[in-house]
Image (cartoon, helix red, strand yellow):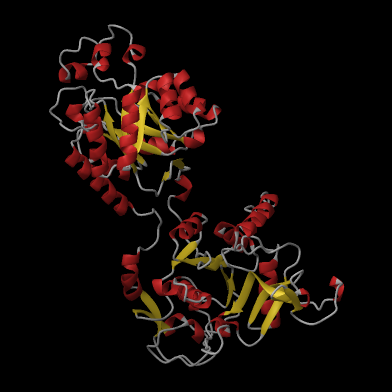
Amino acid sequence: MIAHTIEQAKAANRVNAVCVTTDLSMAADVARKLGVYVVDRPPELAGDAATVDSAVRHAVETYEQFRKPVTHVVILYGNVPVRAPGIIDLAVEHLMKTGCDSVRSISPVDKQHPDWLHRLEGDKLVQFRKNSIYRRQDLEPLFYHDGAVLAVTRSSLFLTSRDDNHAFLGKDRRAVVSSGGPTVDVDSPADMAVAEGILAARATSLGMQVEQGLDTVTLTDASRGGGVESKSVNASSQCPAIQIANRTIGDLQSTFIIAEAGVNHDGSVDKAKALIEAAKAAGADAVKFQYFISDHLVAENTPTCDYQIQNDSGARNQRELLRRLELNEGEFRELAKCARDVGIFFLATPFGIDELHFLTNDLRVPAIKIASPDIINIPLLTAACEADLPIILSTGASHESEISRAVDLIRRCGAAGRLALLHCVSSYPTPRGDARLRSIAALKSHEHFGVPTGFSDHTAEIETGAAAVFAGAAILEKHLTLDRTAKGPDHFFSLEPSQLRDFVTAVRAAEVSMGNGYLEPSPAELQVRELARGRILARRAISADEIIRNDMLTVRRAPVGISAALWNTVIGSRAATFISADSPITPSMLQTDRTDSAAVS
């Protein structure tokens, strides 16, 4: 809902600054993606006991420290996504035209008019206000504050009183009537349904009304959703997220870590269950196996790869090797139940359409993982699309053209919105120098793909997971074994349980150090920012009504005062009062003919 409020504020002609104040990370992320600067609301202003006006005062003061003085403020509540067109400008214009202290938008009371209300005494109706009116046109015109707009002068906003919770509205309180469309204040599912219907009808015009070329600043209150002007360094490069069960996979989300148990169970259900428990204990989000029927997967006498021969002596061909590593449907049911009991997502890579149907229809896995060799397997890719589940597709040993053809097929099947691509190097183990982690970003930024990306890691190292996160991976897949020295095709480059735990720990640490990608100070910097940056002070005494020149001012570190960044704004202003030498310059000391208004939602 906050997005609609921000867009309405940005579209208003009489608002030249937009800012959101919030303690909600989701609201802050939405605001930043819309190019709005966010004021982080401190804990003491975020509780139920905190008032809207106190949060707005904090936002205004923060904005003025880093931007420029404000003369008028427009408060827009974030849970009011529908407003009458033009109502924001109407309120601001009325505020400035009349010279009053505040202007609120109001709407006519309709069927809930007091003259038509009743009290219940038992089951007996008693008029709330005794009258004999039965025609609507005979009702006294009454109005209520509809929450669409509250415009107030800065000076009134900073008035407080123990006896009047609305002292910030000043003494001269005026109103404008919302007309030309409804106002919807969302407090219930029914309200939301009404708002969604109206917004759907306005869909073409909403989002197209952002003013271009204005110095826009809207101060937004986010106890009900709010924001302040900011620019995101990476918002435009973010890919759409996908959903795996209750997990969102994408930028600025926790990395989805898959422990690849693969065939490291050696055909033993007990070992497979131990791998599930080890994956959970290490902190992985999912555990994955490989489901194949060797007689269906490989033709007779297909030779094994060199790495398989070196680490699994005795297998004369691929079919013979894989037959020893097969698990049947009943055994996979046991493993899926074990994963549910342990509390970890259960996945398996199908190597055939029958196996895929079993996983999706019988075991109801939350996603389908397609192995690198099957990136060219059109029947299997098509069946995966038809399953209506998220698809994780590895790209090992693939040319860009092959990846593009696979993505094209998935897009034609209508499944691109649930696709993720994994960079993968089909070399076992992958030497560190061959990991090519920049390919993660290449997949992510590819103009043809536009899906979340990750890394299927076949290196033997622990550190590559964290490095992949720095490269932009949203999903990681890492092989897990109970014993690296065991005989088998994949044990020797897999991580043992303690190593996987270190892998996960390093990934989570990398996530923390990545931050959100926004070019703004971190909370840890705020004290230094506050105390080490210069503010504007009077170099000499300045008389009231004197025009301020460069030689009258200086920049020093001080606890209060207008930021040095606003030097050119202060120069040429008139002093509103006598300013003594060495005094920090504050907005109240300056006269202004401007009507710089800020909208706060």
- Residue at the outermost front position: 122
Residue at 18 percent of width and 16 percent of height: 309
Query: Which quadrant of the structure image shows residue 370?
Result: top left
Residue at 40 percent of width and 49 percent of height: 252
- In the image, residue 115 above or below residue 167: above
Q: Is residue 126 left or right of residue 36?
A: right
Query: Which quadrant of the structure image shows residue 311?
Result: top left
- In the image, residue 93 above or below residue 588: above
Image x and y of residue 239, in percent: 46, 42
- Residue 43 is at least partly visible in this image: yes
Query: Which quadrant of the structure image shows residue 91?
Result: bottom right
Image x and y of residue 4, in percent: 60, 58
- In the image, residue 249 above or below residue 359: below
- In the foreground, 16 or 424: 424
Image x and y of residue 234, in percent: 43, 50
Q: Is residue 370 left or right of residue 198?
A: left
- Residue at the outermost left position: 485
Image x and y of residue 462, in percent: 20, 40
Query: How many numbered marks appear?
Result: 0
- In the foreground, 427 or 437: 427
Query: Which quadrant of the rendered structure holds the N terminus?
Result: bottom right
- Residue 210 is at least partly visible in this image: no
- In the foreground, 519 or 141: 141
- In the foreground, 408 or 442: 408
- Residue at the outermost top position: 301
- In the image, residue 259 above or below residue 169: above
Query: Which quadrant of the rendered structure holds the C terminus?
Result: bottom right
Q: Is residue 463 left or right of residue 161?
A: left
Residue at 15 percent of width and 15 percent of height: 313
